[in-house]
Each structure stands twice: as structure tokens, then as C-alpha cells.
Image (spheres, rainbow, N blue to C red):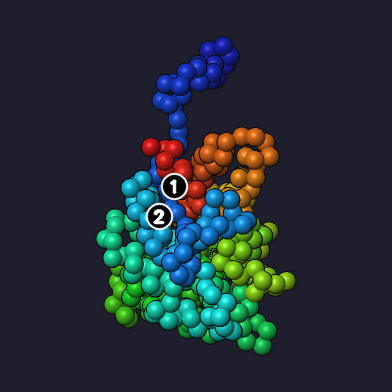
Amino acid sequence: MHNKYPFTRLRRGRQASWSRLLVKEHHLTPSNLILPLFVEEGDGEPSAIESMPDCFNYSIKYIINKAQEAEALGIPAIALFPKIALSKKTEDGIEAINPDNLICRTIRAIKEQKLNIGVIADVALDPYTSHGQDGIVKNGNVDNDITLEQLKKQAIVLAKAGADIVAPSDMMDGRIGAIRCALEEEGFKNIIILSYAAKYASKFYGPFRDAIGSTKQLGAQNKSTYQMDPANTKEALSEVTMDIQEGADWLMIKPGMPYLDIIKLVSDHVNVPLFAYQVSGEYTMLHELAKKSHQDFIPLMLEALLSFKRAGADAIFCYAAIEIAKELR
Ligand code: PBG
């Protein structure tokens, strides 16, 4: 009876911006955003990342500026990714556990500023390996358990440097449990583990691999023996369940827009904070769309980010977080 025209005209609620505002179901605020930042050696000017418009590799001095800017805009956290010099990349990625490596120095420099912003550090070996894989290769395979030993040490080194959140991103089995135990043993009881719980073997990471300089290293190889098959849905729930049992505090699904069904599924199934990563390829795609269709980038990005909120994500990693936060204020 009630859903019958003309008694029900859904357009009544859409007639003015005030009425649309009243019935808006989902909201995006700067507090929903996490800013990923790329850091490089030296103290030079920011260097452009060719495959990611308006994105730069920053030296430590400039990263500090970015962290301050993010804090001032109400962005609650930044995620740091290092571009490691070719000369420091090795088969075993041992630079990952050097307490004076680029990422640890960056974390310490940011922490000295006493900002009210969370610092997230990736736990994975790919920036450090000469072959670009996320783990240590033995007999042609990315060896799960040998890699875990190194990840534990990497997590401790990052925690000692002052990271608030460690984010294991490599999809090795058992990494969350191994890292949680290592952190507890070393007395780091308050470090948050943000697990890249369902991370798919995606082509959308292409620009990121350019940014951290691992594209050439990886060559024709892929990461399909550890990252998830894009064809799988139920497996994401297995990954998520395992990671919660092993001690993950928060979860992430990645990439974002091509995997909104997974975000929705996981948010319907678990009661753990859930993040989404709008990855480098999605970011570049939206920039290219804006350019090719003569539209502004920001409204396209805002629409894309709202889709994550509808799907159930609490916060979103977004390379345009600063620009979006400015728009939202
Ligand atoms: C690596 C890592 C990747 C991303 C974040 N951490 C790439 C990969 O798995 O090859 C991708 C982020 C992006 O594309 O924006 N452990």
C-alpha cells in the first residue's frame, strides 16, 4: 500500500540539498582516511612518480611536512613505504631488519615531532629483495617458514623505531601469529597489527611497484603462490578468520574497488575494524578518467571513496587523502 505511486514519491526527499543531506545514509570524513607515503634516501626535493599523477617520493625532511599536513587536516594515520636503493637489495632482503634502514630512520624522525597521528609500517620483504618477491626464495619457491623468521625480526625493528601499527602485507601463512608472539615476547604489547588479511594477486599494484622500484626486480614473475586468486570469495573468509585467531587487531582488504563484494562480505561476517586499500592502479585510473573525460578528479574520487563506506569499510588507504581531506573540510 505504502510503496505505491503517487503516495510514495522517492523524489520528494531528493528535491533540495537540505533534504538530501537529511537522508544521507553514508558519510565520508577526513577521519576515514589513511595517507600512504613513499620515502626515499637523501635530502633532495620530492621526485615525481611517473605512473601515479601528483604522487611523489619524499625524502625524510619532506615526509615530516606531509605528516604535519595530514595531522592538521584530521587524517588519523599515515602508512610508510620505502624506496630502497638498488645497491641495498639482496636475495634475502636482509636490509629489512637493519635498525638504521630508511624506514626506521623515517619513523624515528616522524615520532620526534610528537604528532597526533598513527604511523603504519608495512611488514614485507619486497622493497628489500633483489628479485622483488615478498619472501625469501629457496629452490625456486618463496619459502613460507623461512620468511616468517625474517618478518618477526622486521616487525620488532619497526616497533623499536616507534611504529604504532605494523601491517603484514605479504600473505605468508602464519605471519600474524608469528609476529604477534614476537611482539609479546619483546614487550610490545600495544602495537596494533593491521593485517592485509585478504590481499589479491592483482595487476592494480603496477604503479606502486614502479614507485618503490620493484617492477624490474619482479620482471615476468608474479605473486600468485601467496597472494589470493581474484576468482576466490570464500577463501577471503578463511584468511580473515585465521588472522583474527592469530592475533590481528584490524583487517584490510586489497585492492578496493574491484573487490567491494569482499569488503561487504567480510564486514557482514566479522566484528573487527575493517580497512580497504584503494591501490595505486585505482588511483591512477581515476586520474586518467578525469583527464580523458574532462572532469575534475576530486568528485570522481569522492564517489569512489563512498563506495567503500557503503560496503562497510571503516577507513580507506587513499593516495589522494590530503586533497580529499581539504575538500571535506
Ligand atoms: C607489498 C605491497 C604492495 C602494495 C602494498 N604493499 C604491492 C605488492 O603486493 O606487490 C600495493 C599498494 C598499491 O598498489 O597501492 N608488500
The relative height of residue 120 versus residue 159 in the rendered view (above or below) is above
- Residue drawn at x 58%, y 14% is 5
Horizontally, residue 309 falls left or right of residue 219, namely left
Which residue is pictured at 54% across the width and 75% down the height?
85
Q: Which residue: 56% across, 11% down?
A: 6
Determine contact: label 2, label 1, CB under 8 Å.
Answer: yes
| Residue 66, numbered label | 2
The one of 281 and 195 positioned closer to us in this rendering: 281
Which of discs 2 and 1 lies nearer the camera? The answer is 2
Position of 203 compared to 152: left or right?
right
Task: Give the secondary structure at mark 2.
Answer: helix
Disc 1 marks which amino acid? Ile
On the image, the x and y values in percent for residue 115 come to: 29, 57
Numbered badge on residue 322: 1
Q: Residue furthest left?
A: 114
Queried on whether the Cβ of the residue with tag 2 lies below 8 angstroms from ligand 1, the answer reads no
Which element carries disc 1, helix, strand or loop? helix
Residue at 33% x, 75% y: name it: 160
N-terminal of the pair, mark 2 or mark 1, is 2
